[in-house]
Image (spheres, grey):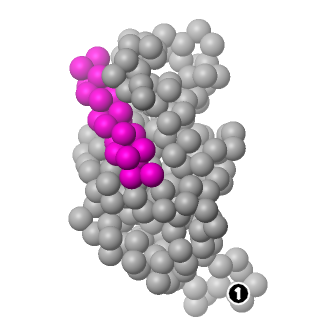
């Protein structure tokens, strides 16, 4: 699994280079591909000791690749629909969500649901700045090394989600955007694998 995740990280890096060379404007340049959080191992330990086992795929992604956010636009590329750009939150985001949940726990009714999911990315509506649903997430405690994601448009695991996004130049929503002008084949030339 480590080799697969390392290969995905290399494909993401190549895609980001191609996007940058094309004139793509990243919405949050500092969050595009910053590498692993310095505190990723501690974040994993904290989450697991507080609420349960994380999936191995997510732990390895956070430790070896980090996070990615392809939010942005290109002045010359057009598409109608939701692009569902590749986003994987950093481990620090999951810890912040857990802390918020724990801070609010005293105010919660005993019938409220426990903390059972780790957010991975906004849903495709939120990625397009439209009010939408719950974020893509993984259930915890983990039951598989690469379990299904919750909330994605089609059933897929975390690693399948990243791979599928890379098949469409980082924007899997393009599969549902007939007539788009994005150069998917060119973007994918150096990210195939």
Quarter holding residue 9: top left
Q: Nearer the viewer, residue 11 or 101?
A: 11
Residue plotted at (28% across, 61% down): 37
* Residue 132, placed above or below residue 80: below
In the image, residue 169 above or below residue 90: above
Residue located 24% across and 65% down the image: 38
**What is the magenta range?**
1-24
- SS assignment at label 1: loop
Q: Position of residue 142 (x, y in %)?
A: 59, 68
Q: Which residue is mark 1?
A: 109
Q: Position of residue 89 (x, y in %)?
A: 42, 54
Asked if 43 appears above or below 162 in the picture, the reply is below
Q: In the image, 87: left or right of 38?
A: right
Q: Is residue 11 above or below residue 79?
A: below
The residue that appears at 56% across and 41% down in the rendered structure is 160
Residue 51, percent from left and from top = 54, 80
């Amino acid at each position: 699994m480590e080799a697969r995740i390392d290969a995905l990280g290399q494909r993401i890096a190549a895609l980001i280079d191609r996007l940058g060379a094309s004139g793509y404007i990243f919405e949050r340049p500092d969050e595009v591909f910053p590498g692993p959080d310095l505190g990723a191992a501690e974040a994993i330990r904290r989450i697991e000791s507080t609420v349960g086992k994380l999936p191995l795929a997510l732990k390895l992604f956070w430790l070896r690749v980090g996070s990615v956010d392809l939010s942005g636009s290109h002045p010359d590329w057009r598409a109608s629909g939701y692009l569902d750009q590749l986003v994987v939150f950093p481990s620090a985001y999951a810890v912040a969500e857990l802390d918020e949940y724990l801070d609010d726990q005293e105010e919660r009714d005993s019938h409220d649901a426990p903390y059972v999911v780790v957010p991975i990315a906004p849903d495709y509506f939120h990625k397009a700045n439209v009010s939408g649903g719950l974020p893509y997430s993984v259930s915890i405690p983990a039951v598989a090394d690469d379990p299904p994601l919750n909330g994605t448009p089609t059933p897929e695991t975390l690693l399948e989600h990243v791979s599928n996004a890379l098949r469409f130049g980082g924007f899997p929503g393009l599969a549902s955007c007939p007539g788009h002008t994005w150069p998917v084949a060119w973007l994918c030339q150096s990210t195939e694998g």
